[in-house]
Image (spheres, grey):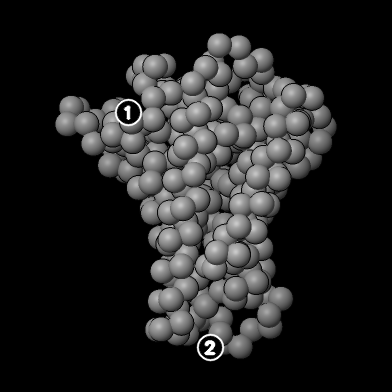
Amino acid sequence: MSAREFLINLAIIFSVMAVGALLETAVPLFAAGSRERGRRAANLVLMAIVFLLNWLLSSVAAVAALTLRPAGLMAQLRWPLWAQIVIGFVAIDFSVGYLSHRTLHALPLMWRFHRIHHSDPFVDATTTYRTHPIETVWRFLFTIVPIWLLGIPAQAVLIQRLVQSTNGILEHSNVRLWAPLDRALSLFWVTPNVHKIHHSREVSETNSNYGNVLSLYDRLLGTYTPSERAYSVVYGLTDVDPVDAANLPRLLSSPFDGDKPPAKIAA
């Protein structure tokens, strides 16, 4: 990814975050209160690290693609471009949005890193990129594998990444969506209410609604919780000190603590 493309991506993401922040002010789901103290600064630094790491990984992948020129399945079958874009979008969304996310919960080692995201005591637009660098690499692997195996065209990758980034910010935003609209959209789409349930302290709710863009995978695979439950959700993790949840050095180092690993949240 060139520096120009990287800056364009940043401009789009920051614009969407600005929209999310305005919506949070206009129609908030919950009042923030004291839970806001310190966490936003840590979230924004983690966001900067994620952006730089994604730029590096994307650049390495692009160089590898140009050098190795892998021929994927769809290219060999000569499917029409529109079909490749649709299939490619769904394949990437399932792999990185649902499958990688579910493994982050199911594997004790990966949960050590993913729990940084769930430890946020309040969920808003800044929570979107509150992820450990190791998790970023893990998710990237689930992105690049289907691209190479299927030969997904660049158009599908760009569309999926744009929709994923945009919806990721909106679904984390602290906004109250009109109930009838939420019910209609959540039949196939991950709305803010659908994703808020995933950030619940209740294990049964955390182990649901893994999807990032489409909610169809959760519905088909039995991991869907109705979005109406979002209004009573309590965020964060019970075994994380609120001070540590806003402490950047602790967030980065906690997965490597030598003590007993945190209780596994089974998928």
Q: Secondary structure at mark 2?
A: helix
Quadrant position of residue 245: top left
> Nearest the camera: 138 or 250?
250
Left or right: where does residue 60 sit relative to residue 189?
A: left
Q: Position of residue 217 (x, y in %)?
A: 57, 50
Q: Amino acid at mark 2?
A: Gln
- Asked if residue 194 shows in the view, the reply is no
Quadrant position of residue 218: top right
Residue at x 45%, y 39% (from the top left corner): 46
Residue at x 53%, y 27% (from the top left corner): 40
Q: Position of residue 199 (x, y in %)?
A: 52, 29
Report which residue position mark 2 lands on: 76
Give above or below for 4 relative to 119. Answer: below
Quadrant position of residue 23: top right
Residue sitting farthest toward the left: 258
> Nearest the camera: 195 or 246?
246
Q: Position of residue 34 (x, y in %)?
A: 55, 11
Quarter of the image for the C terminus: give it. Answer: top left
Decide: few, some or many residues near mark 2? Use Cα within 10 Å; few <14, some 14-19, many ≥20.
few
Q: Position of residue 123 (x, y in %)?
A: 57, 27
Picture disc at residue 102: none
Report which residue position mark 1 lands on: 250
Q: Secondary structure at mark 1?
A: helix
- Asked if residue 10 shows in the view, the reply is yes
Distance of mark 2 from mark 1, alpha carbons?
48 Å
Q: Amino acid at mark 1?
A: Arg
Residue at x 29%, y 39% (from the top left corner): 108
Residue sitting farthest toward the top: 34
